[in-house]
Image (spheres, rainbow, N blue to C red):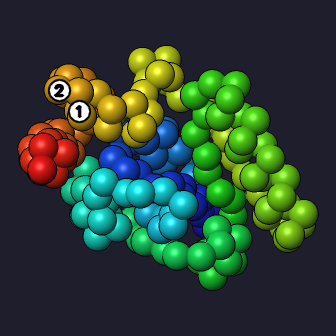
Amino acid sequence: MKTALFPGSFDPVTNGHLDIVSRAGRIFDRIIVAVASNESKSALFSMEERKKFLEHVCMDIPNVEVISFKGLLLDAARNLKVSAVLRGLRAISDFEYEFQMAMMNKELDSRFETVFLMSSSQYSFVSSRMIKEIVRLGGDVTPFVPPIVNQALKEKRGKILEETAE
């Protein structure tokens, strides 16, 4: 059975992430979507919230499992005995970063494989960072995120604005 690990911070999960998951589900027998703890980033949503969102939006994709993890991606991949790590690419800038990470992981463990999937054109400009910025400035992100995430972002925006006003 070919299993891919799709790691990310998913803060928040976007329709672009879901596009990668659903397309990869046609290539791999099993996809493990892994919500990563990233201490270098200040997350808008807790790891538990992000995992809950992903479980909800992936529930109709039969070969998808959602987990969370801390630590090295390489360790998670080894522990889960995956065939490959899946990464989505939107632009050349994504490739440069992801290529460097893939090569470092390959150097640390020669069995480590990374598979890149290009984003679909309608999501090639969507990033979690942009989504948060649009919401912060009062914009509508309905076309870019699942409804459960859109609602949560609206609720978070109110809290963010209250904190900023104090």
Disc 1 vs disc 2: Cβ atoms closer than 8 Å?
Answer: yes
Mark 1 burial class by Cα count in 10 Å: few <14, some 14-19, many 20+? some
* Residue under pointer 2: 138
Q: Nearer the viewer, residue 27 or 5?
A: 5
| Residue 48, picture quadrant | bottom left
Q: Determine the residue positioned at 85% across, 53% down.
A: 103
Q: Is residue 133 above or below residue 160?
A: above
Q: Secondary structure at mark 1?
A: helix
Image coordinates of residue 117 in percent, x first then y, are: 62, 36
Image coordinates of residue 31 in percent, x first then y, are: 50, 58
Amino acid type of the residue tagged 2 in the rendering: Gly
Q: Determine the residue positioned at 12% across, 43% down.
A: 165
Image coordinates of residue 99 in percent, x first then y, are: 78, 43
104 relative to 42 in the view: left or right: right
| Residue 131, picture quadrant | top left
Q: Determine the residue positioned at 40% across, 39% down.
A: 128
Residues under labels 1 and 2: Cα distance? 5 Å
18 relative to 80 in the view: left or right: left
* Residue under pointer 1: 135
| Residue 50, picture quadrant | bottom left
Q: Secondary structure at mark 2?
A: loop
Amino acid type of the residue tagged 1 in the rendering: Val
Q: Nearer the viewer, residue 80 or 158?
A: 158
Image coordinates of residue 78 in percent, x first then y, are: 69, 77
- The quadrant of the picture occupied by the N terminus is bottom right
Q: Determine the residue positioned at 65% across, 57% down.
A: 85
Q: State the count of labels.
A: 2
